[in-house]
Amino acid sequence: MTSYNRATLLAGVVVAVVVGGILSYFASANPDGLEKFQEDMGAAQPVHEGVEAPPLAFRAYNLKWLGKGFWANAAGGVIGSLAVMGILLGIGRLVRRRRAARAGT
């Protein structure tokens, strides 16, 4: 890994921690676009009564085992941001490998 890639990765981690850990606490409590659309279409509640959603680790954008408040929200935001960053880095690595394989053949 070159120094440029390390610096870019470090900057991405810092941004993920700041956005996920600090700025996510100030996010609006109003529903986002998808939730608003579901409410408008009447699809916010399950069609079949008695069907419950599976337990989620990140329900309401916080870690339930940390309780409620700033730290639970910050930890959920940081872990979520880093998870998305890791997925995107993995996809980028796969794309780069495929391009290298095509160029080599």
Image (cartoon, grey):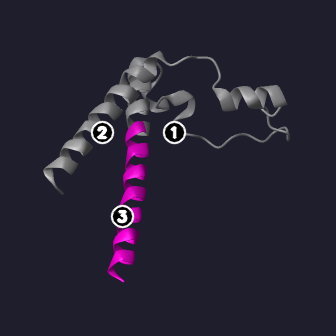
Q: Name the residue rendered at 38%, 22% in the picture.
A: 71
In percent of width and height, residue 25 lies at 44, 19
Q: Name the residue rendered at 23%, 40% in the picture.
A: 10
Main secondary-structure element of the magenta-colored stretch: helix
Query: Is-magenta flag for residue 90?
Result: yes
Q: Nearer the viewer, mark 2 or mark 1?
A: 2
- The kind of residue tagged 2 is Gly
In percent of width and height, residue 35 lies at 69, 29
Say whether disc 3 or disc 2 marks the residue closer to the N-terminus. 2
Residue 46 placement, left or right of 32: right
Quadrant containing the N terminus in the rendered view:
bottom left
Could you tell me how many numbered marks the image carries? Answer: 3
Say whether disc 1 or disc 3 marks the residue closer to the N-terminus. 1
* Residue for badge 2: 12
Q: Nearer the viewer, mark 3 or mark 2?
A: 3
In terms of secondary structure, where does tag 1 sit?
Answer: loop
Residue 56 placement, left or right of 65: right
Q: Which residues are magenta?
A: 81-105
Viewer-proximal residue among 10 and 78: 10
Evaluate if marks 2 and 1 touch, with contact meaning CB atoms under 8 Å apart. Answer: no
* Residue for badge 1: 57
Quarter assignment of residue 73: top left
In terms of secondary structure, where does tag 2 sit?
Answer: helix
- The kind of residue tagged 1 is Ala
Q: Name the residue rendered at 26%, 45% in the picture.
A: 9
Q: Residues within 10 Å of mark 1 (few under 14, many from 20)?
A: few
Q: Nearer the viewer, mark 1 or mark 3?
A: 3
Viewer-proximal residue among 43 and 96: 96
* Residue at the farthest left position: 3
In percent of width and height, residue 26 lies at 46, 16
